[in-house]
Image (cartoon, rainbow, N blue to C red):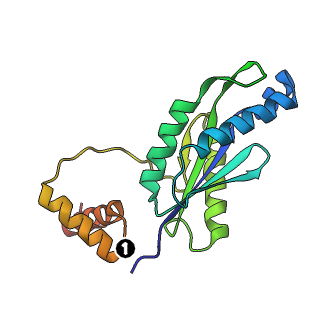
C-alpha cells in the first residue's frame, strides 16, 4: 500500500522588505496578517497553517495530492494578489510565491519534504516571483478529459479501497500504458 499523501506549500510574500521600507513594519505586519487570514479561510478539516519564519507561511494539506494542492494554491494566489486594502493602513500591492512538495512523492521524511518545498519556493522567486513551483522540475499541465460514469465510479472505489488518491492511480495507469507501448 502507498503511504498517505500530505502536501506542503510554503507561501512567501514577494518583496516583503520593500513593503516594510516603503510603508513601515506595522504595514508589513498587516500584510502578513492579511495573508495568514486569507489562507486560513481556504482551509478545512485537519489542514493547517503555520508561521514558517520571516514572511513565509506553511500550509499543510493532509490527504491532498500534489496536483490538487497545486490547483488550490494557484487559485488562491490568483485571487489574492493585487492591491490589498489593509485595516487602518494604506492600499498595498502584493504578490506571493509558493513552493510545493508532497510526502511521500518528494521525500519520506518531514525534513526532506520541507527542504524540497523551500527549494521550489526559491525557484519561484528566482524565476520571476508571483508563481508556484513544484519540488520537482516537472511541469504540471492541466488536461481535461471525459470519462464514462462507470469508469469514474470504479476509480473512486479503487482509490477508497487502496487508500490512494485518484490522480495517483491515473498517473500510474498512464505510466503503465506508456511502458506497454514503449512511448
Disc tally is 1
Instruction: Reply above or below: 89 against 11.
Output: above
Farthest residue in the top direction? 90
Residue located at (20% from left, 69% from top): 180
Find numbered disc 1 in the image and state the secondary structure of the residue it sits on: loop
Residue located at (48% from left, 52% from top): 69
Residue 159: x and y in percent read 30, 69
Q: Badge 1: few (under 14), some or many (20 or more) residues near its Cα, within 10 Å?
A: some
Farthest residue in the bottom direction? 1
Residue 177: x and y in percent read 21, 65
Instruction: Reply above or below: 110 against 34.
Output: below
Residue located at (83% from left, 22% from top): 23
Instruction: Reply above or below: 6 against 119.
Output: below
Residue located at (62% from left, 33% from top): 128
Q: Is residue 107 left or right of residue 141?
A: right
Q: Is residue 147 left or right of residue 97?
A: left
Residue 134: x and y in percent read 53, 51
Instruction: Reply above or below: 82 against 137.
Output: above
Q: Which residue has dot 1 on it? A: 163
Asked where in the image residue 85 lies, by quadrant, the reply is top right
Of 178 and 92, which appears nearest the observer? 92
Of 6 and 130, which appears nearest the observer? 6
Quadrant (top left/top right/bottom left/bottom right) for the C terminus: bottom left
Of 74 and 79, which appears nearest the observer? 79
Quadrant (top left/top right/bottom left/bottom right) for the N terminus: bottom left
Residue 93: x and y in percent read 67, 22
Q: Is residue 95 left or right of residue 157?
A: right
Of 1 and 29, which appears nearest the observer? 29
Asked where in the image residue 17 lies, by quadrant, the reply is top right
Asked where in the image residue 50 lies, by quadrant, the reply is bottom right
Amino acid at each position: 500500500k502507498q503511504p498517505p499523501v500530505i502536501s506542503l506549500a510554503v507561501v512567501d510574500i514577494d518583496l516583503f522588505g520593500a513593503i516594510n521600507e516603503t510603508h513601515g513594519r506595522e504595514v508589513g505586519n498587516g500584510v502578513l496578517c492579511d495573508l495568514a487570514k486569507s489562507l486560513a479561510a481556504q482551509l478545512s478539516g485537519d489542514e493547517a497553517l503555520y508561521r514558517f519564519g520571516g514572511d513565509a507561511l506553511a500550509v499543510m494539506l493532509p490527504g491532498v495530492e500534489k496536483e490538487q494542492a497545486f490547483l488550490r494554491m494557484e487559485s488562491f494566489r490568483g485571487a489574492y494578489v493585487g492591491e490589498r486594502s489593509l485595516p487602518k493602513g494604506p492600499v498595498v500591492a502584493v504578490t506571493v510565491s509558493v513552493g510545493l512538495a508532497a510526502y511521500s512523492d518528494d521525500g519520506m521524511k518531514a525534513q526532506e519534504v520541507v527542504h524540497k518545498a523551500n527549494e521550489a519556493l526559491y525557484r519561484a522567486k528566482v524565476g520571476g516571483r508571483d508563481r508556484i513551483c513544484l519540488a520537482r522540475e516537472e511541469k504540471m499541465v492541466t488536461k481535461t478529459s471525459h470519462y464514462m460514469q462507470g469508469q469514474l465510479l470504479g476509480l473512486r472505489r479503487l482509490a477508497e479501497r487502496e487508500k490512494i488518491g485518484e490522480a495517483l492511480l491515473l498517473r500510474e495507469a498512464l505510466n503503465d500504458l506508456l511502458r506497454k507501448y514503449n512511448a
